[in-house]
Image: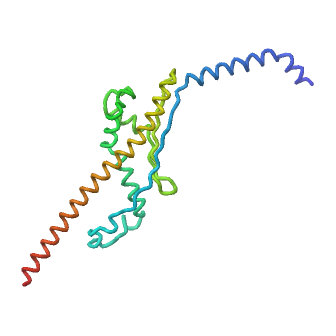
Amino acid sequence: MDIMKTLMKWRKSILLNVFYISILSAIFSLLLPKTYMASAVLMPPSNQSDVSMLNAFSESDIPFGGLISKSEEEAMRLIAILNSRTVMESIINRYNLIGYYQSKNIEEALETLSDHIDIEIEDEGTLSIKAYVSTGWLHYEEEEIKARNLSEKIANEFVNQLDIVNKRLQTEQAVHQREFLGERYQKNLNDLIEAD
């Protein structure tokens, strides 16, 4: 009963405080920056070098002495490509992130971009790329739309750049394999000629 009397006595004060706190919370939530996240999930390709000619000359098919599987090794290689300076700089230049992040130079933009992405291997063995873009404190709806679209574009561009760099590296590897096999073939021919 004493509690009810106390509540009735201070009800006006309590209701006013709840009202003021609600208004302040609503205003504060509208002023807060919003962060948008876009993600891309990739299935690392099966390692096609399993059937390459070079494996016929290797002593073991087990990568890193069997410490990790070939699919994990491939995923880690893709993560290294995604975290490379080449990929990051191309994304910064494509979307003018130096201006968007209000960075002084490319180094500062690289640091900011790397802080706003998450690249990891999920439990299922997939590769997850997450890009985060935030609005300013007091922002309009246009800025929210721009941040949402930019996060999506950045995540998709990481996938695109991964494809470009990966194809280039595979082409270079194929050229080196062809050169190696050509040298081995020529050496074997020379050995056969000398044996006769």
- Is residue 11 left or right of 78 when viewed as pictured? right
Q: Using residue 24 as the reference point, say whether residue 73 is left or right of it.
A: left
User: Residue 84, percent across and down?
Assistant: 33, 45
Q: Name the residue located 47 percent from the left edge and 49 percent from the top edge.
A: 41
Q: Residue furthest bottom?
A: 196
Q: Position of residue 8 (x, y in %)?
A: 86, 18
Q: How is the image coloured?
A: rainbow
Q: Residue at x 38, y 41 (%)?
A: 157
Q: Quadrant of residue 109?
A: top left
Q: In terms of depth relative to the viewer, which is nearer, 144 or 69?
A: 144
Q: Is residue 23 above or below residue 188?
A: above
Quadrant containing the C terminus is: bottom left
Q: Quadrant of residue 177?
A: bottom left
Vertical relation: 71 (above or below) 20: below
Q: Residue at x 36, y 33 (%)?
A: 95
At 43% across and 34% down in the image, what residue appears?
A: 150
Number of callouts in the render? 0
Residue 90 image-quadrant placement: top left
Instruction: Looking at this view, name the residue that lies furthest to the right.
Output: 1
Q: Dividing the image into 4 quarters, which one contains the N terminus?
A: top right
The foreground one among 149 and 194 is 149
The answer to whether residue 1 is left or right of residue 140 is right
Q: Position of residue 141 (x, y in %)?
A: 52, 24
Q: Is residue 193 above or below residue 109?
A: below
